[in-house]
Amino acid sequence: MNRTNQALVAVWVVIAACIAFLVVDLLSSRRQVEVRLRDQAVSYVRLIEQHASAAFDRSNIAMLGVIDRLRPDDMTTGDRPPEKRRKEIADLLLRQQQRTGAAVAMYLVDAEGRFIARSGGTGNGVNVSERTHFQTLKREPRTAVAVSEATLGRIKKTWGVTVGRRVDAPDGSFAGMVATILSLDENFTNFYSSLPLGKDSAITLRDPENRLLVRHPAVEAKLGQPVATSGWIRERLLAGDAEGVITIASNIDGIERVFAFHRLSGYPIYAAIGLSLDAALAEWRSERNVLAAGALLLLLAGLFITVVLRRSQRADQVLAESEARFRGLAEQSLVGILLYAAEGIQYINPGCYRMFGYAQSESKDLSLLDLVAEKDKAQVAEAIRDRLSGLVPQGHYAFQGVRKDGSAVEVEIFSSRMSIAGRPVAIAALVDITERKRAEEALANENARNRMLLRHASDGVCILDAKGNVLDVSDVLCNMLGYTREAMLGMNVSHWDQRWATEEGKEEFKRLQRITTHTTTFETRYRRRDGTMFDVETNSIGFEFDAEPMLFLSSRNITARKSAQEQIRYQAHYDALTGIPNRTLFYDRLTQGIGLAKRERYELALLFLDLDKFKAVNDDLGHEAGDEVLRIAAARIRGLLRESDTVARIGGDEFTVILPRISGREDAAEVAAKIVDALAAPFQLSMVNGSVREVIIGCSVGISIFPADTESPDGLVVAADAAMYEAKRNGLGFRFRASSKLR
């Protein structure tokens, strides 16, 4: 192989390597765009989930406030409460509705779905027993909250959903439902329209059956209907997955999007967002054109080198063929190609004509500067001189061009100096980057909006580096912790969350940074600047920036939620009037007490109490007086018992007492006698008018013994109940079950 051929092989190997590198870089860039879009989708869907959860939390807390103020007889099946009481309930519903800030209405229905009251009124005669959310609450005792499908309001003609909460009777059975109607426009659609999501983006809220509750942009024909979606998304929803991300075409409008979904915390609803892949790739396509221009420039340079090297060895025919190939490549190129010398333009391809709006016949009298805007002519003239003189053999810069019609076009130019027939020329590739410029400006605006979202997010948000130091922080987190933004920048996360200060915490922090495909949710406690502590729920997701691991944290103060949960747990096991255990907790403790008595072989006594003359107090003095009697009676009984004993109110004026570890029936008889004496003492009742009334009621007590009478919880209750009625019939204070030796 002669030297010329060796040189050509080397040149083309270098060109091939460069083009391969450009292709790999282009594919990597597209992948980065897709990964960035997935990260944006996850961040936005978390923001949407937090906004939706907050709206439902406000409704839930408002409904809990209603339930807490209901009386046992408010939900009685049969006759509805008196009109005066219904008006009180309606006023209560209106106050709680106003506290939510965005509810359209609140209402209360009984176990048959009949209206008891609604906010601002006493009901409209509508029966909701056939509504799906009502049936769900009635059919499933463990379901506390249910959400309806989206419905169109009959009066305002706006879309909304109903959030219902189960109301339990004292015995744990279904007593009815309190419900809040939320307007989709006021609570969700207006917020979604304010988000800078970009072209062809879509936001939805769906239930576990994949019914569409909210969509932005709106497609009203689909609201309330199951959404035809991909098998993957349907499987994730049916499996109850908390979150997920997939790239897929929408079955509603056919647009390919990156979809991310996230289940609302504590509610059977999913938030989903789809970001258009085509819109996100606009900048990448501009980059592709630039790289294509660079690759084409390399090919053209290689062809020119080949032509020059072969000219000394080949005939004019070979040179003509090479020039023809060059012209063929140039004329088929998507970008503009110019060949210019000191005398002016030597060659211009069709791509350049199209870019600047000229016909091929009009190019004879054109100079390169005729295509340049006035403000950039000096820059381009200097670049031409540098290239042809050899001072700067190669160059890359951008300028604003002028089309034939006077409109502006943004141009990026790649040029290189070479010698043809002993005279200097320059070859240039021109790329129209107008769209890329617009995309860059849009990206800059989007980055500014994202920074604004971070600073003003509804939850406390921060971004941490590999060591846990704050790189950026939202105003909400600063206010939450009591620091200024300047003080928090650079602060280590262990300063306000001690869990990260230990070796185990540092390892956990590194593990969370490696989780980049989904968010991790956990609860922790933060310390404010003043030293006070509070509970938070935190979502984290790791990501990389400039090859360095980072961690995104979004924290929400859940002190109110914790308090509400504790209140729900308390209401489920304790009597609201007297503060002592209710029927549910009584049976739980009785079952546990019997199990322990079996293992450790000791006796247990159950006392069943019924107040005498209680109905007369209620009828003569009113329910308020009756309630005060029950509270005083519960306090007197509780004062006579050991810490290990249990007193419970199981309904009306009936109480039970569990006495574990008794030495014999005499112990049970002694406690029963003390209770009879305590409840026989006069009750001093404060009346509404300020006076004090004294009443005497008394009680009857039935006693059963484990294991002598029976070994089952229900058996002990039945036996003690029968003994109580026998004591009441015979006018005795207390009585054991008939089989017991001690009467």
Image (spheres, rainbow, N blue to C red):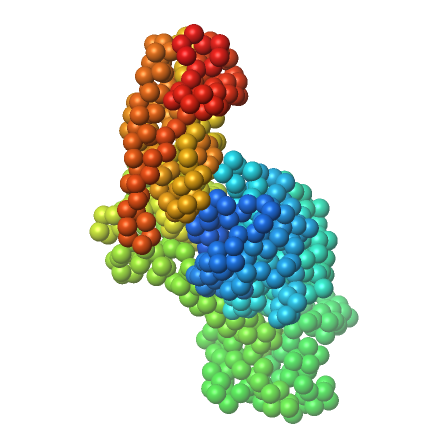
What quarter of the picture does the C terminus occupy? top left
Q: Nearer the viewer, residue 401 or 18?
A: 401
Q: Residue at x 58, y 63 (%)?
A: 184
Relative to 321, does residue 488 appear above or below in the rendering?
Answer: above
Q: Where in the figure is residue 145, as x and y percent of width and height?
A: 55, 47
Q: Nearer the viewer, residue 573 or 495?
A: 573
Q: Residue at x 48, y 12 (%)?
A: 738
Q: Is 707 left, or right, of 563 in this rendering?
A: right
Q: Where in the figure is residue 127, as x and y percent of width and height?
A: 65, 55
Q: Residue furthest left?
A: 530
Q: Nearer the viewer, residue 261 or 4?
A: 261
Q: Nearer the viewer, residue 674 or 534?
A: 674
Q: Is 706 left, or right, of 355 in this rendering?
A: left
Q: Where in the figure is residue 523, as x and y percent of width and height?
A: 40, 42
Q: Where in the figure is residue 392, as x and y percent of width and height?
A: 47, 73
Using the rendered view, name the quadrant where residue 155 is placed. bottom right
Q: Is residue 190 visible?
A: yes
